[in-house]
Amino acid sequence: MTKIVSSGISRRGLLGAFAATAVAAAPTCSNAFGLLRGAGDIRRIRMYSGRTGESIDTIYWIEGKYVPEALNEITYFMRDWRQDEVKDVDPRTVDIAAASHRLLDVSEPYLLLSGYRTAKTNALLRSRSRRVAQNSLHIKAQAADLRLRSRSVSQMYRAATACEAGGVGKYSRSNFVHMDCGPIRTWGA
C-alpha cells in the first residue's frame, strides 16, 4: 500500500503548531469554514483509496494558511485514477470534508470513492448510472464521494449538512455521501 505523507512541514514547526493550538475552542456548526476557524489553527484530512491502495494523512492548514505542499499531495491523491489525470482540488471541498469528519468524532480515515473526474470518466460513469450529473462538480475538482465504516450514511449526511457549506448528497443504497463546495443544497434525504 502506497502512503502519501506531507513533506513540506518541519517537525519543529508542526510541534510548535500543535502546542499553539492545544487549548482550541470547541467548534460551532455555523458553516464548514467557521467550524474550522473555531477548531484551532490546524486542519487535517485522512483518507484512503481502495482503487489505488494509497492513503493520505496530512495537515493542510496551519495558522491561517493552506500548506501548498499538502494541497498538492491531496490533489494527487484525489486524481482521476481511471485516466491518471490531476486537477487542483478546491480546498473548500477538503475543508467541508475535514469539518464533517471532526463533527463525527472518528479517527477512521474516509474511504475516497471519487474525487476529481475527467469529462471522459464522468461520461463513462453517466452511461452506467442516471444518478451521475452531466455537469458534475467532480469535473471541476470541487467534489468528493466519501464513506466511513464506523458511521452510517445518515450520520455522515447530517454532519456534512450541519456545516451549511456546499452540496451534500445522501446515497444510502451505494453507501456514500457526496460533499462539494458548490451552492448550498441537499438531496437524497
Image: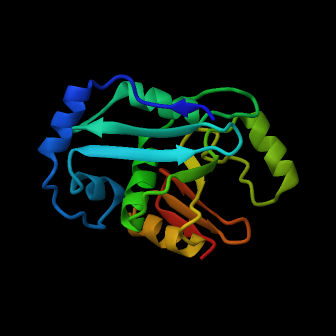
Q: Who's the residue at 81% across and 59% down the image?
A: 130
Q: Position of residue 33 (x, y in %)?
A: 31, 53
Q: 129 or 63, which is in the foreground?
A: 63
Say which quadrant the C terminus sits in: bottom right
> Within the image, what quadrant is residue 7 found in?
top left
Q: Confirm whether residue 6 shows in the render.
A: yes
Q: How is the image coloured?
A: rainbow
Q: Position of residue 93 (x, y in %)?
A: 47, 47
In the image, is residue 170 above or below residue 182? below
Q: Who's the residue at 35% across and 22% down the image?
A: 8
In the image, is residue 85 above or below residue 189? above
Q: Who's the residue at 20% across and 27% down the image?
A: 12
Q: Position of residue 76 (x, y in %)?
A: 56, 29
Q: Who's the residue at 20% across and 42% down the image?
A: 18
Say which quadrant the N terminus sits in: top right
Q: Residue furthest front?
A: 1
Taking the image as shown, residue 109 lies to the left or right of residue 177, namely left
Q: Confirm whether residue 165 shows in the render.
A: no
Taking the image as shown, residue 84 lies to the left or right of residue 62, namely right
Q: Position of residue 34 (x, y in %)?
A: 26, 56
Q: Residue furthest right?
A: 127
Taking the image as shown, residue 32 lies to the left or right of residue 137, namely left
User: How many discs mark residues in the rendered view?
Assistant: 0
